[in-house]
């Protein structure tokens, strides 16, 4: 079985590391398979299949560490990796905060069977993916006003990972993913506009039909035809659910332990302060079933658990791994993410923002005159001050009704003020790892015509 093979590889890496002189070490092995199909103009454009096993090793000598990785799993390569990592660690600068977890901190649950992260259904054939891609393309082209489909795609992947460390941790699990997407175009030349639709799920049976996805891409594209520039001034702005998660993402980046420990976060003094309107919370839940961001343990072997990041508008804590927690004098929040060739760093998984009582359409109706943002074009965001400026496109609203599509606009504000003024709709899609509804904001500046 793949799980046993990966377990054996991590144990071999650890044994070689100890033999080479490492005082402690952790290892990761990942085996993956993926197939993707792209079609264009009724023809197969590209078909790719990838299979690989990759391994990573981190060794620690005192307060020095080094990481190495490889895609060759031969005994010779494993031995060379261990020797190289130990040599690198001896030359690395000291970091007083690094170190493996204490055995008492380690997760007891070491597989993800209860989280349903791997689809038990048979892997789809390439012909199944090709059919989905063609169906998505045909559905987009059937929308009146679509001139062509830039690309329609379908993909599938399955990945198994195993982690082990010299502190006694050993665990792993499998993940799967199935996705369909389409990019449609309307108009020609300088009048050309494009938009897209995409869906992905852990279980194939949960994925919407390719026809629905293609149709949505076409309808979004046609709705954006013949855009104008938005008006300049201070107006209400509604971040569409498609992109609203990016705004909450800036908050999550600002509470990341790495940024906080470096003093490079606009929320570095925000612990215990109001960062969202009263009544709104952000909850992280790494144990949601069939969700891509779920996991039973983090990249350092600590048990994951639900936590409230923002409670009734107040920031309650940082996102920490062991090292950033030690630096800030706090326990890890079990948010370590481990790469093959990099040490653990803090990262947030599944989060959900409190949804509001009103629909997206009700918020639009109450806007008066303003802007709906559906996509971004570039960004200038200062992670230290929170100053925010982004190019946008979307739709102009007057008297609470959508009037026409817009592009070539810029919105600007400061994240401190923006986040404390958000009004959430109730349209968040619950299958997403980041469950964030459309967000209405006041007080931003729009630069347009």
Image (cartoon, rainbow, N blue to C red):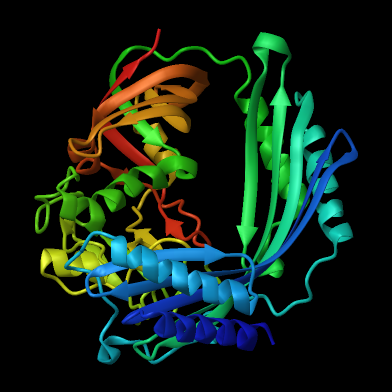
Residue 337 seen in the current view: no
Residue 106 % position (x, y): 33, 87
Residue 83 seen in the current view: yes
Residue 119 % position (x, y): 67, 75
In the image, is 111 to the left or to the right of 121?
A: left
Between residues 438 and 67, which one lies in front from this camera angle? Answer: 67
Q: Residue at x 79, y 27 (%)?
A: 148
Q: Residue at x 26, y 62 (%)?
A: 319
Between residues 317 and 409, which one lies in front from this camera angle? Answer: 317
| Rendered image quadrant of residue 443 | top left
Whether 378 is drawn above or below 408: the answer is: below
Q: Quadrant of the N terminus?
A: bottom right
In the image, is 80 to the left or to the right of 44?
A: left
Q: Quadrant of the C terminus?
A: top left
Between residues 49 and 222, which one lies in front from this camera angle? Answer: 49
Whether 120 is drawn above or below 437: the answer is: below
How many marks are shown on the rendered structure? 0
Residue 144 % position (x, y): 78, 27
Between residues 214 and 93, which one lies in front from this camera angle? Answer: 93
| Rendered image quadrant of residue 233 | top left
Residue 139 % position (x, y): 80, 41
Q: Residue at x 50, y 74 (%)?
A: 28
In the image, is 5 to the left or to the right of 62?
A: right
Q: Residue at x 35, y 82 (%)?
A: 303
């Amino acid at each position: 079985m793949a799980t046993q093979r990966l377990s054996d590889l991590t144990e071999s890496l650890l044994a070689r590391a100890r033999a080479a002189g490492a005082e402690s070490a952790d290892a990761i092995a990942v085996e993956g398979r993926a197939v993707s199909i792209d079609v264009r103009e009724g023809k197969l454009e590209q078909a790719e299949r990838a299979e690989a096993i990759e391994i990573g090793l981190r060794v620690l000598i005192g307060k020095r560490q080094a990481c190495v990785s490889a895609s060759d799993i031969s005994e010779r390569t494993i031995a060379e990796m261990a020797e190289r990592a130990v040599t690198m660690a001896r030359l690395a600068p000291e970091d007083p905060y690094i170190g493996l977890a204490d055995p008492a901190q380690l997760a007891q649950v070491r597989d993800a069977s209860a989280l349903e992260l791997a689809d038990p259904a048979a892997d789809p054939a390439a012909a199944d993916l090709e059919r989905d891609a063609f169906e998505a393309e045909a559905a987009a082209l059937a929308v009146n006003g679509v001139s062509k489909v830039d690309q329609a795609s379908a993909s599938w992947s399955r990945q198994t990972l195993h982690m082990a460390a010299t502190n006694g941790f050993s665990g792993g699990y499998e993940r799967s993913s199935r996705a369909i997407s389409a990019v449609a175009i309307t108009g020609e030349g300088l009048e050309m506009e494009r938009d897209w639709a995409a869906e992905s799920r852990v279980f194939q049976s949960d994925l919407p039909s390719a026809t629905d996805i293609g149709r949505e891409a076409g309808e979004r594209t046609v709705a954006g035809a013949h855009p104008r520039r938005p008006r300049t001034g201070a107006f209400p702005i509604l971040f569409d659910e498609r992109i609203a998660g990016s705004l909450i993402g800036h908050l999550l980046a600002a509470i990341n332990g790495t940024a906080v420990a470096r003093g490079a976060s606009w929320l570095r003094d925000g612990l215990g302060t109001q960062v969202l309107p009263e009544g709104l919370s952000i909850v992280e839940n790494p144990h949601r079933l069939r969700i891509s961001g779920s996991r039973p343990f983090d990249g350092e072997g600590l048990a994951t658990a639900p936590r409230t990041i923002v409670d009734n508008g107040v920031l309650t804590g940082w996102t920490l791994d062991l090292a950033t927690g030690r630096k800030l004098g706090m326990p890890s929040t079990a948010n370590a993410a481990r790469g093959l060739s990099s040490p653990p760093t803090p990262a947030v998984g599944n989060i959900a923002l409190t949804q509001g009582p009103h629909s997206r359409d009700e918020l639009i109706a109450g806007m008066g005159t303003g802007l709906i943002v559906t996509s971004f074009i570039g960004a200038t965001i200062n992670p230290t001050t929170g100053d925010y400026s982004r190019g946008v496109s979307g739709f102009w609203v007057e008297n609470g009704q959508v009037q026409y599509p817009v592009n070539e606009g810029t919105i600007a504000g400061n994240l401190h003020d923006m986040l404390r003024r958000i009004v959430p709709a109730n349209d968040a899609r619950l299958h997403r790892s980041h469950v964030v509804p459309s967000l209405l904001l006041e007080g931003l500046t729009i630069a347009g015509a």
